[in-house]
Image (cartoon, helix red, strand yellow):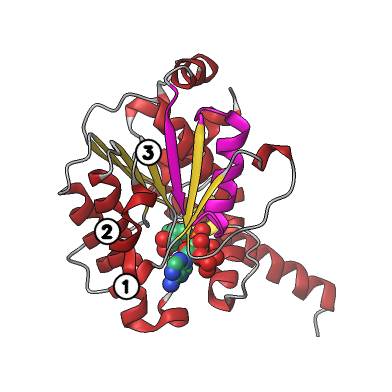
């Protein structure tokens, strides 16, 4: 009989080989990074300064969620808007000076038309709204991830908003057989049809975050993709901070087209450029 140490050593080696092979395969499938982001040499500080002088205002949908919370921090730290409004279904509590000037609009998402005023007068809109099928059921999921998001975008556009930044999902496709990806793809297409001067879609993979809410399936996926991410794969997962940084940095850039889609690798790359600023 072989000693236990030898067996364990072989098992560990085998596991390492399997993980490395998976990482290599995932890297092979990594999204191509658009040239725009790899060759971006513009100084973020200068871009921020220029943007700040334009005295623009923004609103955030989903600021109580995991991405929304970090996005709000990023917006406050970089201080590029003279006014930030949070639009949500409940009043949020904040402590400290940075939050003093925040405006909150509490709305009933089932009666958004009655809250049109909340969506008026913003230059830029950020949307990190979303639920899950497990939490809300099929109808509830479609209602939040499609209907609430689209109606908010419509009201914002009617209220003068020119830029809309939507956190969608990797694999979003209105023709997908999978409900989640189909709904995400459909809302992307419907908002694009509204004709914002600028519409940016972010399609992150698995969000790497220590989520407050318990989602066991997602927890397992996170553990796996965290390991993959540590091995350099940028296609499948992303730290939530990188998404927030990318959304803010991208606001400062001049896109080549009115509508753009940032896949996971592009978000990672843009998030890093903000870290290095
Ligand atoms: N989880 C992932 O790995 C992953 C990957 C790719 C893309 N995404 C997408 O990224 C987006 C943000 O994800 P996240 O994990 O940061 O979100 P999250 O933590 O689940 O937060 C969701 C936000 O939506 C709001 N919301 C949910 N149900 C609502 C309802 N019925 N009425 C009004 N507001 C409602 C929540 O408000 P309350 O705080 O009031 O509940 C919260 O502000 C989502 O669209 C998600 O589908 C997620």
Q: Which mark is residue 150?
A: 2
Is the CB of mark 2 within 8 Å of ligand 1? no
Q: Which mark is residue 143?
A: 1
Q: As displayed, is residue 2 above or below residue 41?
A: below
Quarter of the image holding residue 3? bottom right
- The quadrant of the rendering that contains the N terminus is bottom right
Do we see residue 172 in this rendering? no
Q: Position of residue 31 (x, y in %)?
A: 36, 45
Is the CB of mark 1 within 8 Å of ligand 1? yes
How far separated are the C-alphas under marks 1 and 2?
A: 10 Å
- Labels 1 and 3: the sequence-earlier one: 3
- Labels 1 and 2: the sequence-earlier one: 1
Q: Position of residue 168 (x, y in %)?
A: 36, 55
Instruction: Name the residue rendered at 35%, 48% in the picture.
Output: 119
Q: Where is mark 3, residue-wise?
A: 122
Label 1, secondary structure: give it.
helix
Do we see residue 270 in this rendering? yes
Label 2 Cα neighbours within 10 Å, binned few <14 / some 14-19 / many ≥20: many
Label 3, secondary structure: give it.
loop
Magenta-highlighted residues = 55-82
Q: Is residue 40 left or right of residue 93?
A: left
Label 3 Cα neighbours within 10 Å, binned few <14 / some 14-19 / many ≥20: many
In this rendered view, identify the residue nearer to me: 201 or 1: 201
């Amino acid at each position: 009989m072989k000693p236990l140490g030898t067996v364990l050593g072989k098992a560990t080696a085998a596991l390492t080989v399997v993980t490395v092979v998976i990482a290599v395969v995932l890297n092979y499938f990594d999204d191509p990074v658009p040239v725009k982001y790899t060759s971006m040499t513009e100084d973020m500080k200068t871009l921020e300064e220029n943007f700040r002088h334009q005295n623009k205002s923004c609103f955030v949908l989903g600021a109580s969620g995991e991405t929304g919370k970090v996005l709000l921090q990023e917006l406050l730290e970089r201080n590029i808007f003279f006014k930030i409004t949070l639009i949500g279904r409940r009043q949020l509590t904040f402590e400290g000076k940075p939050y003093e000037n925040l405006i909150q609009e509490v709305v009933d998402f089932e009666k958004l038309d009655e809250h049109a005023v909340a969506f008026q007068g913003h230059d830029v809109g950020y949307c990190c709204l979303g639920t899950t099928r497990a939490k809300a059921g099929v109808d509830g999921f479609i209602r939040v991830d499609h209907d609430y998001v689209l109606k908010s975008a419509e009201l914002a556009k009617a209220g003068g908003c020119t830029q809309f930044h939507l956190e969608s999902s990797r694999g979003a496709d209105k023709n997908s057989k999978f409900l989640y990806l189909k709904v995400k793809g459909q809302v992307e297409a419907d908002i694009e049809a509204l004709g914002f001067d600028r519409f940016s879609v972010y399609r992150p993979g698995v969000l790497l975050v220590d989520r407050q809410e318990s989602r066991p399936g997602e927890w397992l996926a996170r553990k796996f993709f965290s390991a993959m991410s540590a091995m350099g794969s940028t296609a499948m997962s992303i730290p939530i901070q990188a998404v927030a940084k990318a959304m803010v940095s991208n606001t400062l850039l001049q896109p080549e087209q009115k509508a753009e889609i940032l896949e996971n690798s592009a978000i990672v790359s843009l998030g890093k450029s903000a870290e290095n600023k």
